[in-house]
Amino acid sequence: MNNSLLILILVVILFIAYQLLMKKKKKLNRFREEWESGEFLARSEDHQSVSMYWENKKNRETIYDGIDQLTWDDLAMDTVFKKINYTQSSVGSEYLFNQLRDINPFFEDIQNKEELYKLLANDQALREEILHILSGLGKQNYTDSSSFFYEDRKYNIKYVAVYKLLALLPFASIFLMFYSLKFGILSLVVSFLINTIIYYKNKTALENELYSTAYIASIIHAGKRFSSVKHLKFTTFANEFKDKVQPIKKILVLNNIISLGKGSKGDFDAIYEYIRILFLLDFISNNNIIKTISNHKDEYRELWQRIGQLDAGIAVAFYRKSLVSYCIPEFVEREELSFENMSHPLIKDPVTNTTILGKCTLITGSNASGKSTYIKAIAINAILAQTINTVLAENWTMKPSYIVTSMVIQDNVLDGDSYLIAEIKSLKRIIRLCEQGKPCISFIDEILKGTNTIERIAASAAMMEWLSSNKGMNIIASHDIELTEMARKVYANYHFSESIENGTVQFDYTIHSGPSKTRNAIKLLGILDYPESITKKANGLAEYFTERREWEEMKAIDVIY
């Protein structure tokens, strides 16, 4: 009988071990397939959840700069983030999101990050072991796990000492039974009723709290697993994890108490829950978890950030591998931005451009010729250069700078702002950044297009002159040819052009030196079968203005019915 029982236990253990081994093998196969193909199926994550670390850091640190929301939206950086986000955990997603928004022109640890990217890219065995641990941590929305090291979290149930006393009451009732069975049983029933009322009255608030602390326990468990990784180049990391986990590892025991019976099926699940209710285990254990984190916020923060750094590091290495070409940027002190064969990260089979840009640049050209895409490509790559040390170009040189844009302006109905007011406020952000004396590169698409021609050109020219005399580089795209003439001594002129061939518009999406000279907008009227009188008159008016710098007055024409 004993031998049969031992054999049965051995079979069960071997079966469980086999299932775990197959599960790990399946994960590794997926990781290898993704790494080879450069493609992955991203798990859906709520944007507000992913941005929690960024929001916590921005709201709680006294000095914190980064990419503001208008710039982020102008450049479709949410889409860029999703393209890079090959992270396996919520910690990694939040860390990477923050990393892309947290531009630091002083590059305190950029070299350390580059060494990590190369290590994770080149060492397959180490990378896969890290991926396996991170995938075990996994992703959960709204855990807000970073807030625990930015504030003193206090348990939201008052009078914790009273609950501890109530938790001891069942033990006292059991001892009382030895002296009076009747009063002991009565005391036990009363304590159970009281604790049941307390449990269910506060269950919703408690479960919300437990949701976060359960993920924190998973973070600590992942840190414990990282501390056991045996790899020569990971030794420093493993030792750091060991140091950070040591003072907070009792959270794992406390979380096991809270998890008692959860996930099991049948009558035992109810029995376990009654035990947790009777002794208020969830309340007391959760309170101790929060107290432990509050007493060791530094260790928890460093543990959280180190896990995020590893996860984001693999995501960056994966992104680089998926690119046709990329380079590591070079940073200089002069106000210059130069690149060779730069491309836009979100365009498939993009046209590349090579340019050397100085302090002030004005780009002209017609709609759809490539102006906006070009300056967005520069801005996005300038962000990637300073956050993940990666640029989609063969060469890239720039001055470390904050990035700010004014591009996709929209009416703000809630604030009562018209298009023009919204545009003026957007531009004021750039002025404010320059006034603070911070190094910045501003990107403006169609400056002040929300007003009439005379005021637009006058105000645009005045702002362009002001920007040229203050700290920072600025790159402006405009339709207004007048600006190329007014600013030719201060701003370097570039343009995008198009041609009309066989009745269709052809764009080369390549930047050219000098201001735009084409008038293809009028030619398009003829191609689209507008009345000949309209196209002829339009050409005549344009030539009249070019020669005299004033517009010909319209003539009254009798209408024939």
Image (cartoon, helix red, strand yellow):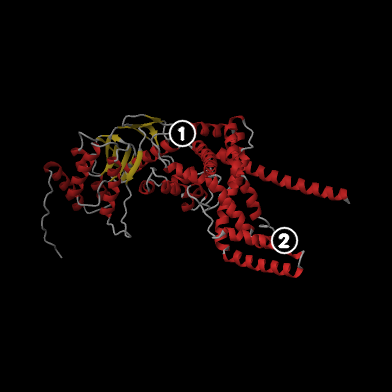
Residue 497: in sight, yes or no? no
Spatial CA distance of label 2 from label 1 is: 52 Å
Q: Quadrant of the C terminus?
A: bottom left
Which kind of residue does numbered mark 2 sit on?
Answer: Phe
Is the residue 203 above or below the residue 241 in the image?
below
Name which quarter of the figure residue 353 lies in.
top left
Q: Most extreme residue toward the right, as rendered?
A: 1
* Residue topped by disc 2: 268
Identified at 59% across, 44% down, the residue is: 248
Q: Is residue 561 left or right of residue 438?
A: left
Q: Most extreme residue toward the front, as rendered?
A: 179
The tag earlier along the polypeptide, 2 or 1, is 1
Which kind of residue does numbered mark 1 sit on?
Answer: Asp
Q: Which mark is residue 15?
A: none
Residue 307 image position (x, y, % from top left): 55, 41
Name which quarter of the figure residue 165 lies in.
bottom right
Q: Nearer the viewer, residue 216 or 103?
A: 216
Q: Nearer the viewer, residue 50 or 377?
A: 50
Q: Is residue 459 left or right of residue 329?
A: left
Q: Secondary structure at mark 1?
A: loop
Residue 374 image position (x, y, % from top left): 35, 40
Residue 300 image position (x, y, % from top left): 54, 44
Residue 518: in sight, yes or no? yes
How many neighbours does mark 2 have within 10 angstroms: few (below 14), some (14-19), or many (20 or more)? Answer: few
Q: Which mark is residue 109?
A: 1
